[in-house]
Image (cartoon, rainbow, N blue to C red):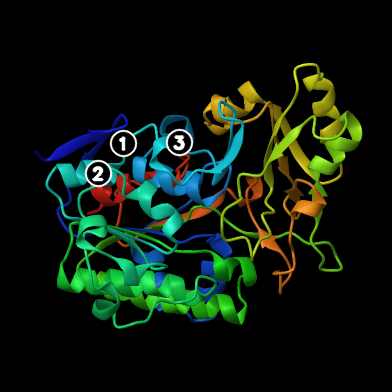
Amino acid sequence: MHQIEVNGRGYRLPAQPSVVVCVDGCEPDYIAQAIAGGHMPWMKWVLASGASVIADCVVPTFTNPNNLSIVTGAPPSVHGICGNFLYDVANNVEVMMNDPKWLRAPSLLAALADAGCSVTVITAKDKLRRLLGHGMRGVCFSAEKADQTTIAEHGIEGVVELVGKPVPEVYSAGLSEFVFAAGVRLMETQRPDVMYLSTTDYVQHKCAPGSAGANDFYRMMDGYLATLDKLGCAIVVTADHGMNAKTRMDASPNVIYLQDQLDAWLGAARARVILPITDPYVVHHGALGSFATVYLPADVDVAALSTRIRALPGIELVLPRTEAAARFELPPDRIGDLVVTAERFVVIGSAAARHDLSGLDAPLRSHGGLSEQRVPLIMNRRIANLDAARRWRNFDAFDWVLNRAA
């Protein structure tokens, strides 16, 4: 077998070690500013000698939908993961989308393993591990819980000893560095056919492009990628979403508390605002992002309410369910009656009382909306006759590394 088909797309089996890296929150300007400062010599060389475009990630521009799109080669309308968090209408409960039961499509990683490839997946946070590794035979673990790996559950043990680094704090740049360090060590010692590395956006939430903290991060990443390159890997670098400042001119969070607004208009608790950015790691963003869904009672005039929400300063887009599902390739049964996005420098909250912003020790930076949809798609191999005018997606990453790498 030299080719497999997954979710309607064909992929060649790897002819060389193939690595896809999802750099969480990698606004393209981070790379540009780091290169300008001399911090990414390897990436500068790749941009000159390999293949690169600015691609679109999926909306909502959050971690879970985009990581699953990358590893399935398909949008959320196919794989079903439309946020980090959703309202389970059938059971009347708001839940995290970490359980593989929410998946509606197989992953390319599992299919490659079934085809005989050795596959390794390393994530920063454990929230993604079960989704990315669902149905996959191989190595799959998180940096967050690297000291708890077992052969039975993760396909590997003794990770901390192998990497030679302690388990980092969750809220640190070190969590992502552990992902890269572990990837390099496993490529040196086990040389898997396919590797998927997924970082955390702690640094991007804290540090703007060109800042010392951002440049330190991208310099670190550049060194590990250069090592993987020297080991003979075909590498694609992309991102799950971009990142922007979400502040007023006085540096305070620029928030529209949509639940409070709807309660004032419709009466308390008649509408339900869901923020799909919500996950267990809210210290750096306070569960504030630029995308929300709204569930409404049957007696509400949806069109009239849409007009009213759209008139709020800072709101960019309000779409009814069917239109939103079509435009953003989302499963219609897992979004609300309305989808609402905010402008570039604005985030949407539910009720002010539900958000703890005490952990924000820097001006708020976040994501979720259309303004964070543009992401890098870069490979350290040339692509003959690359169509730069095509709408490339971050979930074309495996197509690049498996089908197009020279």
Q: Amino acid at mark 1?
A: Pro
Residue 334, percent across and down? 56, 30
> 352 and 224: which one is in front?
352
Residue at the spot of label 2: 110
Residue 330 vs 251, above or below: the answer is above
Do callouts 1 and 2 mark residues in contact (Cβ within 8 Å)? yes
Q: How many C-alpha atoms fall within 10 Å of the one at disc 3: few (<14), some, or many (≥20)?
A: many
Percent of width and height locating residue 68 = 41, 44
Task: Tell me the CA gap for discs 3 and 1.
Answer: 12 Å
> Can the viewer see residue 248 in this picture?
yes
Does residue 225 show up?
A: no
Q: Nearer the viewer, residue 234 or 21?
A: 21
Q: Which three-letter amino acid code belongs to the residue tagged 2?
A: Ala
Give the camera-side residue of 195 and 383. Answer: 195
Residue on which the image places disc 1? 106
N-terminal label among 3 and 1: 3
At which x and y percent is residue 401?
Answer: 28, 52
* Residue type marked 3: Pro
